[in-house]
Amino acid sequence: MRIPLWSHLTGRSRPANPFGERWQALLRTAARTPFYARHAPTLRHAARATTEEDRRRALLDLPEVELDYFYQHFRLFMPAGRAVPSHEPRSIWPGESRVAAVSPWFHPGTRARLFLHPDLTALSRFAPEVIAAPVDTLHALAARGGWPPDSPLFALVALTGIGTPLLTTNLRESLWRAFGVPIYVQFRGFQGEWLAGECEAHHGLHAHAGDAMIERRSSGELMVTSLSNPRHAVLRLASRLHAWLDMRECGCGLAATRLQDLQHLPATAGAPARTGLDSLAALAAAVGGSRSHQPAASLGAR
Ligand SMILES: [Zn+2]
């Protein structure tokens, strides 16, 4: 089995100051949205922040956005005119691995192929080295069983996001039993953009400042500011996810903050239960996530 060098995921072509560039791009995009129109002076002030600390302080002057509000009013967060990506999205897997992505979000590279349905036969014929799919889709694949033991597969990437299934300990074990390869969780935004991800130490999700700014409410709820979503500029989005922020250096040697014990917050009394938005793909479609492929939620993945 090949051991992936996770550190490669920091990318070879990242700009010298990705945080600064993406921060500026995000604020420019936000300024073109209806929601942030009345916050234009605050956005201009925030754009002058040059250090990470200044940016974090500037963020506090902008309103928090509750998740239900975002779902109900997502068009308010879409910029007028064409969405311009602030940077090349981070790939699913570094290097030249043969990747099967069961998700409508990613632009597969030359050695990757996109599968819109978790068809085990088609997948195993492709003989991927890495399968990347939403957690519920991986669950469905594992439940069907029969993955060929002689396949070149060496890793699974479990995609998760705001409002989507998380990888539980039990599910991680069942994926291990079904595929016999390590599983790497990637926490992705509404456009599939990278927010945080697991390294080979499998001890929390590394959140790099250049990808997303993550705050934590006193309740433990994470507020996420994605720096790389060109379609919806939303700052300080209350995620309904709970985690604690681990500032200690990881066993892999990276010092980036890690999200530990990522869990859904229990539904608040009286709040409508959010059903149907139970996969990344369904969520992407619900918030205008572009390509209208059949959502994974309808693939019988539960
Ligand atoms: Zn690590």
Image (spheres, helix red, strand yellow):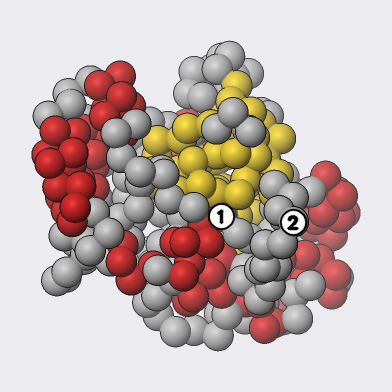
Looking at the picture, how far across and down is residue 265, in whole percent? 70, 47
Element at label 2: loop
> Is 154 placed above or below 247 here?
below
Q: Is residue 167 left or right of residue 206?
A: right
Residue 162 is tagged as: 1
Looking at the picture, how far across and down is residue 138, in whole percent? 72, 64
Cα separation, mark 2 vs mark 1, equals: 20 Å
**Quarter occupied by the N terminus:** top right
Q: Residue furthest front?
A: 270
Q: Is residue 299 left or right of residue 9?
A: right
Amino acid type at circle 2 is: Ala
Amino acid type at circle 1 is: Ile
Image quarter for residue 10?
Answer: top left
Residue at left offset 60%, top offset 21%: 246
Looking at the picture, how far across and down is residue 165, in whole percent? 69, 59
- Reading the image, the residue beneath label 2 is 269
Nearest-to-viewer mark from 2 and 1: 2
Q: Residues within 10 Å of mark 1 (few under 14, many from 20)?
A: many
Q: Nearer the viewer, residue 217 or 233?
A: 217
Residue at left offset 71%, top offset 35%: 261
Q: Nearer the viewer, residue 66 or 157?
A: 66
Residue at left offset 61%, top offset 49%: 240
> Is 182 placed above or below 110 here?
above
Q: Nearer the viewer, residue 59 or 203?
A: 59
Residue 118 appears anywhere in the view: yes
Looking at the picture, how far across and down is residue 289, in whole percent? 41, 72
Image quarter for residue 14?
Answer: top left
